[in-house]
Amino acid sequence: MRTSIATVCLSGTLEEKMQAAALAGFHGIEVFEQDLVVSPSSPEQLREMAAELGLSLDMYQPFRDGVEVAPEVFPDSLRRLRAKFDLMRCLGTPVLLMCSNVATAALDDDRAIADQLRQAGELAAEYDIKLAYEALAWGKNVNDWRRAHRIVELADHPAVGTCLDSFHILSRGDTVDGVELLDPAKLFFVQLADAPLLKQDILSWSRHHRVFPGEGDFDLVDVLARLHECGYAGPVSLEIFNDAFRQADVYRTAVDGLRSLRWLEDQTADAVRAAGEDPAREPLVLSDLPDPQPPRAWDFVELRTSKLGQTTRLLHQLGFELAGHHRSKDTVQAWTQGPVRVVIGEDLQAPLEQPTRLAALGFQVDSPDDAAHRASRLLAPVVSRTQQPDETVLHGVLAPDATEIFFGPHGDRGVPPWLEEFGADPAEAASDSLITGVDHVNLAQPWQHYDEAVLFLTSLLDLHAQPAQEVAGPSGLVRSQVMRSADETVRIPLNVAPTAAEQGAYTGAAYPEHVALACSDIVAVARRARRRGLTFLPVPENYYEDLVARFDLAPDAVAELREHGLLYDRDERGEFLHFYTATLGEVFVEVVERRGDYRGFGAPNAPVRLAAQYRTWEETAGAI
């Protein structure tokens, strides 16, 4: 499948966009007119640059309000077209995107519009250029792809064809039923964009909220599968209007875009194969990625710190025991409790004020090698890791938020072979304990990379996004979306803090990441932790008064919750009890007990935590 990306998707200058697209691995680009107009490079220079980069210049766009105009105005459309064709000849772009009219449309007659398209096609043919006619979702008269294609067929000119854009189709609630029946010779170009389902006017939705495939709610597998069936032979291009993308690093956005196309191509190949068709059928050959390796179990959680004593004391208070120091890495140690393994890396080079942070997540998968190969095809940066010849190979990649993701093998009774490198006794590591596993790990995301993180976890780990929620905190709303494995072994909520925190007004300190540990008896864990001196996150008395009103709990049950600093939630499936530790640097720990089949995360209690963390941060800042 030939991949392309519109320069409007990316930040920076046209020259920077071209370099980023080429470096990411795209075959070609669509040149957005404004990018060319503001560039100091001549069309000839840009054509030469594209050749040196190995990029094809697939399309020039857009040409607006050129057809569907009053007959007396149309000659001026032809004049403008000739000027664009002169430019495109110098640039070397073979296709011009002609949008349906949104402002000056005077014709609402298909044959009259087709006649104007035919005349435009005659002029285009003189330059060996093709016109791709696209129905904009907000077109004044022509706003659906079927009508646009009928007009193209009426024009009946070899230089006039259709451009299909998934956003303009699906945003109107339309379908792509019938695309598989199109004559591929009349389908000149395809643009893909995903989007979250929003209730707002389509133009605003289009201009600000498009995302890459896999980051929204549209069924783009169906779109690509029908294109494959019809025999479409051209590029599959991304056209994304998104405020965050145009402010983000140009290269990482380009990588995110190509990752989305490779993931979509792989998903579509599976769907086509399941339907009894051959995904390798030309001309739209759909390539497979290595099979996903969904996590079978949590392998480890790694913290890095310059305050080793504080960090290990917290683990001791929660019942963890030192499994040992790594035999070849002096600054690395492992702590275990039941099936949970926490690796501590002491950062001796960091300043003393360097906060403790969540550095890495390890997962046990069926084939670590296949997981690493899939990650490579999805353009995930590799984590450099030193190891001795007799040590376990752990393949690692960087997530968009710089969290390291490692893939490890299964060990006997679920105990990984790398734990022996710490001198640990596997039998002891797997013994019964109050802590029964990692319930979930909550990762904080910069707002501009949130969609990228969703796609990364979807495409790499085969996690599935759940509906997003918003909870109120002292600095604004915090958006949270849970990513789950199919068997719910792995749950990773992604949180996006309010923009003010990103800008330093709140330093982000109240939005740390956290590890949630599952337990069999939360009261027993809390009692043990309190005896060992654990500092719990304070819960206000008003919270417990409200619990009585919300759930009509027995007085002794509320008293027990209050005594141990526990929070409570329940739904029709079961109950959820949990407590939080104080924040250590950029991370804290939550301990949870699920009773029955409760599947949530105590979302009604999140504002209590956010407010308590905010108060603690204010007190600390005031003391300084």
Image (spheres, rainbow, N blue to C red):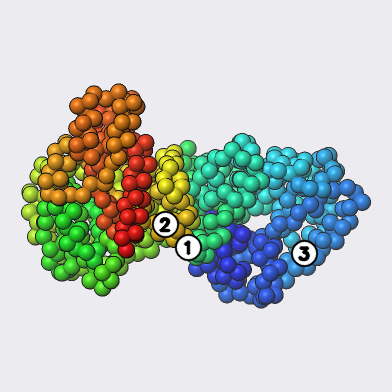
Instruction: Please name whichever residue, 384 or 331, is drawn nearer the observer in this view of the structure.
Output: 331
The residue wearing badge 3 is: 85
Q: Give the class, few, some or many, for how many residues have Cα within 10 Å of label 2's Cα (few <14, many ≥20).
A: some
Lateral position of residue 345 relative to residue 492, left or right: left
In which quarter of the view is residue 64 placed? Answer: bottom right
Q: Secondary structure at mark 2?
A: loop
**Placement of 16 over or under 615, stated as above or below:** below
Residue under the image location 32 percent in, 63 percent down: 624
Q: Picture coordinates of residue 208 (x, y %)? A: 59, 51
Residue drawn at 7 percent across, 48 percent down: 427
Which of pointers 1 and 3 lies earlier in the amino acid sequence?
Answer: 3
Amino acid type shown at disc 2:
Tyr
The type of residue carrying mark 3 is Phe
**CA separation in Å, label 1 and label 3:** 33 Å
Q: Amino acid at mark 1?
A: Arg
* Circle 2 residue: 506
Residue 104 rendering spot, x and y as whole percentages? 82, 48
| 1 vs 3, front mark | 1
Q: SS class of the residue under badge 1?
A: helix
Judging by the rendered image, the residue that carries numbered circle 1 is 252
Spot occupied by residue 520 in the image (x, y as percentages of width and height): 17, 36
